[in-house]
Image (cartoon, grey):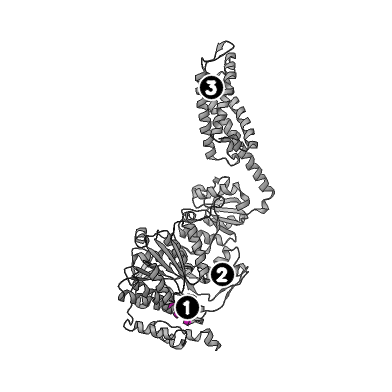
Amino acid sequence: MKLKRFHLSQAIPQMLIDIISVFFSYFIAMALRFEGRIPWHEYEYFAFLIPAMTAISIAVFVAFRFYSTMWQFASMDELLQIFYGTTVAGILVTILGFAAAGQFSVNGLPIYRLPIPVYVMGWALMFLFVGAARFSIRLWHRRKRKSELQKDSEGFQRVMVIGAGEMGSMIIKDMKSAPESQGIPVIAIDDDRSKRGTRIHGVKVVGGRESIPRMAARYDIDQILLAISKADKKDKQDILSICAKTGCRLKTLPALYELLQSDDKSDGRTPIRDIDILDLLGRDEINLNVEEISGYLEGKTVLVTGGGGSIGSELCRQIAYFRPKKIIIFDIYENNAYDLQNELLMRFKHLNLEVLIGSVRDKARVEHVFEVCRPDVVFHAAAHKHVPLMELSPGEAVKNNVFGTLNVAQACDKYHVKRMVLISTDKAVNPTNIMGATKRICELIIQYSSRHCKNTEYVAVRFGNVLGSNGSVIPLFKRQIAAGGPVTVTHPDIIRYFMTIPEAARLVIQAGGMAKGGEIFVLDMGQPVKIVDLARNMIRLSGFEPDVDIKITYTGLRPGEKLYEELLLDSEGGCGKTSHELIYIGTPIPFQEDTFLEDLEKLRAVAGVDNVKMIAIVHELVPTYSGHAEENDALAQNS
């Protein structure tokens, strides 16, 4: 290592201090060995050897990079560096002493080695002095930083860290090294009673989760940081629910899988993100049967219709991990597809990816894509899904959802696709809106195709609302809160089942791996959530008090909207279990298969042309449909 690579302004003073440290280490060792009465000839031996001893020590320190280390951030790693460096220096100095014995003379007297205790004590003192010099630099910088913080503490966030384990220790240390970026850690919280009253890098552990509101008020906390790595989702939700009542801003460290998948390599610091409503409503990480999934995705050409949408794009991200031969994104909206293409190619360097623009309503385009690309597996996520908008344009829901699905299903059989997975919805159960009714017809298409087509295994996957997807309440509530309110909820008693986008995508892929043909898989959606509670939590997470800082107003149910959604039809009975605890199989119910295709052609003829006849046919196809979309059609009302 060449000195020109060091910062000379730091290296030269440190080197001078080390020269003095080496000299006094061995001089004091001699004084201790001879109890303060050093014989004159030993002085002469020492004076002759000490320049070489010092030169060897400094050379070793250079080799161990003592002078290229930022000692103001010294920790256990740097202490080990000092130990190894001084130990090697001590050994080489001892070898020098033994080698020089009898080889040189001073004033006519031959030089003998210094006593062995001098070398041992000299090494110990050298380690002590060199280490003390380094760590005094850290202490000085720490005192200086603390003094600066005390002078201007109003400009920093006062932080409560929840979690006094390894992750908590890491983030506290990180924050103390650069408080200007993340705030000042003031107190820590941990449920482990053995940690109460202890300190982590000077930060006291003051209590468990039950004390969070009281301690937040006592210590004037501005921000709460969740630093728990091993707690399950239920514990985290409980802690976050308590924190949300304090009025403090909430932040968290990403989970390990998020860090591994993250492309953010910004500055090497511990990443911190805002608490999201998904942290309050999500579940523990879903375990997938990798072998089952790999069996039908690895090395295969996979087509995702609606691949640029919320679910479709996440399906593409998840599928990419299973090393497919090729992923084809098929979508009508080129902007989303283009953004997803760039993202996937950055994250998966060797991914074979193709983006094709087109509509599933265009039968010729669909067949051309299948003929050229020859997909092995198709995930059909393309659909109109916004309930109130489809009530205003019911013909478009029928043309896109029903006949888009029919086009894809028929192309799968014609071009020998091995498996087709339809993305369905809980709104297909006893539908009160045209969107749900069309998705129920899509499920019937899957069941019909499974029984009458021999080349493809068809399967549908039914689940509820997806948090954060395009058109969901989460983005709407965020915009309303950012604007200062009010936050609008349709009804105080309305409830919905929720699932995160990654969770839904993983379960869809897993369900696809279980398919035998004709199943309607139903995903376990957990506990239903009141939308008004969701709104209140989002307001609190933003640092406001519901109905005080930001009002919640009720606008009434929209056309086609229900107070609650169902996952099973009454006639489907109970759900059969599968090998995955969160995936069930609904019992298929009989329908008029003999006239099914004829009824679909009748529906095609009147879709968007005669809404009254169209809705009448929908009622015949879906007897449980109770809506009247023809009365809501926007153009019919204006004509």
Q: Main secondary structure of the magenta part?
A: helix
Q: Residue at x 56, y 31 (%)?
A: 128
Identity, as a three-letter code, of the amino acid under mark 1: Lys
> CA–CA distance between discs 1 and 2?
20 Å
Asked if residue 396 is among those painted magenta in the image, a careful observer would answer yes
Tags 3 and 1 in contact by the CB under 8 Å rule? Answer: no
Mark 1 residue element: loop
| Residue most extreme to the right | 151
Classify the position of the N terminus by image quarter: top right
Tags 3 and 2 in contact by the CB under 8 Å rule? Answer: no
Classify residue 73 by image quadrant: top right
Identity, as a three-letter code, of the amino acid under mark 2: Phe
x and y, in percent, of residue 626 in the image: 43, 83
Identity, as a three-letter code, of the amino acid under mark 3: Val
- Depth check: give the residue in front, 133 or 300: 300
Res 118 label: 3
Mark 2 residue element: helix
| Residue most extreme to the top | 108
- The residue tagged 2 is 477
Q: Is residue 112 above or below residue 320?
A: above
- The residue tagged 1 is 562
Classify the position of the C terminus by image quarter: bottom right
Mark 3 residue element: helix
**Earlier sequence position, callout 1 versus callout 2:** 2
x and y, in percent, of residue 523 in the image: 40, 68
Residues shaded magenta: 394-401
- Depth check: give the residue in front, 554 or 422: 422
**Earlier sequence position, callout 3 versus callout 1:** 3
In this rendering, the label closer to the viewer, 1 or 2: 2
Q: Is residue 387 above or below residue 507?
A: below
